[in-house]
Amino acid sequence: KAFDCRTKELQRLGRACSDEEVLRSFVQEASPGGRIFEYLTLARLAVQLGDVLFVHAGLPRSGEKWIPGWLPPAGEILPLAQWISALEDFKTGQLAKVLDPEEMPKASWSMQGGYDH
């Protein structure tokens, strides 16, 4: 759906909208200097306001429980404030890798198993 929406957006802007151009526009926006990269740099991935937790993209479900994915390592339990801090550290570290080509992984996490990897 995002791909189709971006194609229509590029059409409205009078820009080339072949599949390759749509892909190129996504990559450009997600790269340093692009709007998506800027958004992720400035955004907080999780915020606790009182008893409510707001999480960008939600929490992955694991079995019968909602468990924050990726952090902490399996079996480790952190207080929520520490988990939120660790998630922000994770985000910052991943964005730093994008800025340093030597740090970029050869394959993306989504190609290696996705959310429940």
Image: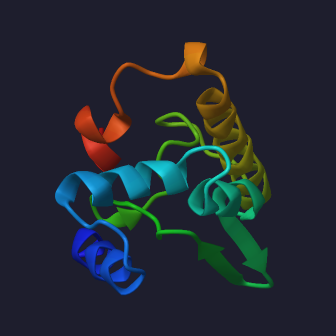
Q: Name the residue located 36 percent from the left edge and 33 percent from the top edge.
A: 108
Horizontal side, residue 18 vs residue 73: left or right:
left
Name the foreground residue: 82 vs 28.
28
Query: Would residue 107 appear left or right of 70 to someone viewing this image?
Result: left
The quadrant holding residue 9 is bottom left
Q: Image height check: is 47 above or below 52?
A: above
Q: Is residue 96 above or below residue 5?
A: above
Q: Quadrant of the N terminus?
A: bottom left
Q: Where is residue 29 in the image (x, y as percent from the top left)?
A: 52, 56
Q: Residue at image x 65%, y 39%?
A: 95
On the image, the x and y values in percent for residue 65 come to 38, 64
Residue drawn at 62 percent across, 28 percent down: 97
Q: Where is residue 22 in the image (x, y as percent from the top left)?
A: 30, 60
- Compared across the picture, whether 82 is left or right of 56 comes to right
Where does residue 111 sit, x and y in percent of width and height?
24, 36
Q: How many marks?
A: 0
Colour scheme: rainbow
Q: Is residue 15 above or below residue 75?
A: below
Q: In which quarter of the image is residue 39?
A: bottom right
Write the residue at 46% across / 36% down: 74
Instruction: Please name whichever residue, 44 or 20, is drawn nearer the observer in this view of the structure.
Output: 20
Lateral position of residue 62 relative to residue 88, left or right:
left
Looking at the picture, tell me which residue is in the foreground, 12 or 98.
12
Quadrant, the C terminus: top left
Q: Which residue of the protein is positioned furthest toward the top in this rendering?
A: 102
